[in-house]
Image (cartoon, grey):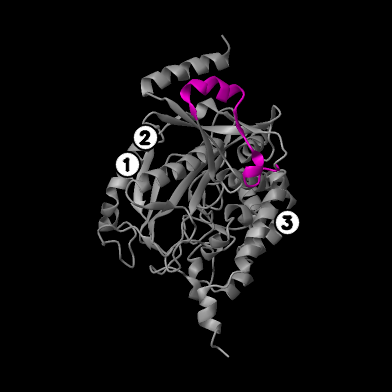
Amino acid sequence: MSQLEAKLNALEGRFQTDGITYLLIQFVDIHGSAKVKLVPAKALRSAAQAGAGFAGGAVWGSGQGPHSHDMCARIDLETYTPLSYEAGVARFAADLYVDESPHPYCPRVNLRQMLARARELGFVFNVGIEPEFFLVTKQADGSVQGWDPHGVDDLSKPCYDFKGISAALEFLRAMNDGLETLGWDVYQTDHEDANFQFEINFKYAEALTTADRFTFFRMMAGQVARRFGAIATFMAKPFATRTGSGAHLHYHLADARSGTNLFVDESDPRGLGLSRLAYHFLGGVLAHAPALCAVTSPTVNCYKRLQVGPALTGSRSGFTWVPAFISYGDNNRTQMLRVCEPGHVEDRTISSACNPYLAIAAYLGAGLDGIARRLDPGEPNLGNLYEVGLAAMAERGIATLPQSLSAALDHFDKDSVIRNALGPIAGEFTRLKRDEWREYHSQVESWELQRYLNAL
């Protein structure tokens, strides 16, 4: 019996035990939006070997037109995910194939290729993501309000507030309980810095697994929230006066054979507990940060979250918690890259609206380039960067991240390392994101009418 046959037999046994009668075969488009087909569970073998067919021209960024051969989504058997909120249904993440070959425009296929490149160098990229999101309701006039059924989530500093989290406890418990049945090792949940904003944390894993989980997390949150009359939105900044939503990336490189964390060095003369390899990786991330930003903050709205300057805090609490400075430092949340503990780095700039497969692939590409070129990020920045003026920042050689999608794309277009990390997807990404910016920039907003209509 082949290994594949053994796995298929085992899964069919689990279907019987778990009562699974339907499968969601799922991939993502270039934006990271989940796309699916619902098939009977009896189609498992076909889904694993031939795949479910999709018309690529109907999907953003697929590199296909209406004349193209079918994209076939072949499930990854290791991603079996029973839906706690929909009895009898399980989800499988899938890789796209065209004419029996991996489709290079599939974000998951692309990330696999980047991870294989890292493994050839002896590395495994371990990643954790902290997904922040808002619970909102949409009004008849199209406006959005926070989901606050008991009218208690109205503090100026609502972070960790007992009343705020209690109002959403049923939703949060449903999410936590469902994720625990999947073995994700959920370890904490909290009310975030903005009203109606929450975060659920689960244990890190190898990068592909984490990207799959973040994708499913967004799917699950949307469906569970709907049962409570709410929308779970991962839009970066749905409210102008409240903190935006990030997907803080925690990571380290591990030895491909032993699993040992290669970022740890307790004898680090800089006192952060990082190895020389880690510093080279960070050097690459910082060197490519402006271009990387286009992928990790890929929407027009993301840049409402990344603004700098005292007049643009955009938060009732007084802090954005989003450092838009290209810097690294100690366990300090005013840095782009925070060294939480020896061998453990967090990037706080990543948007919750990112495509995790593309973001992680680009990120890994930047870090590996830093290792190849032995880049040094310089000495760590200490203290509160929020209190350092922009002029003083410039004197210290600390640049800022791009302040618009258009500016980030300008950097992306010139950065061969980040573009190569996305393969042919880079061309589609640029085209679609330029179109998004032009469409946004052609709109006349209410702020403009209020500001200029009677100004002269």
Return the residue at label 2. 84
Q: CA distance from mark 2 to mark 1?
A: 9 Å
The image's mark for residue 174 is 1
Q: CA distance from mark 3 to mark 1?
A: 43 Å
Return the residue at label 3. 413
* Crowd rating for badge 3 (residues with CA inside 10 Å; few <14, some 14–19, many 20+): some
- For the N terminus, the quadrant is top right
Q: Secondary structure at mark 2?
A: loop
- Residue at x 50% of width, y 72% of height: 312
Q: Could you tell me if the residues under marks 2 and 1 are in contact, i.e. CB atoms within 8 Å? A: yes
- Residue at x 58% of width, y 49% of height: 31
- Inspect the image, locate mark 2, and give the three-letter code of the amino acid beneath it: Ser
Q: Is residue 247 above or below residue 103?
A: below
Q: Is residue 323 above or below residue 354?
A: below
The image's mark for residue 282 is none
What are the residue bounds of the magenta stretch? 39-65
Mark 2 or mark 1: which comes first in sequence?
2
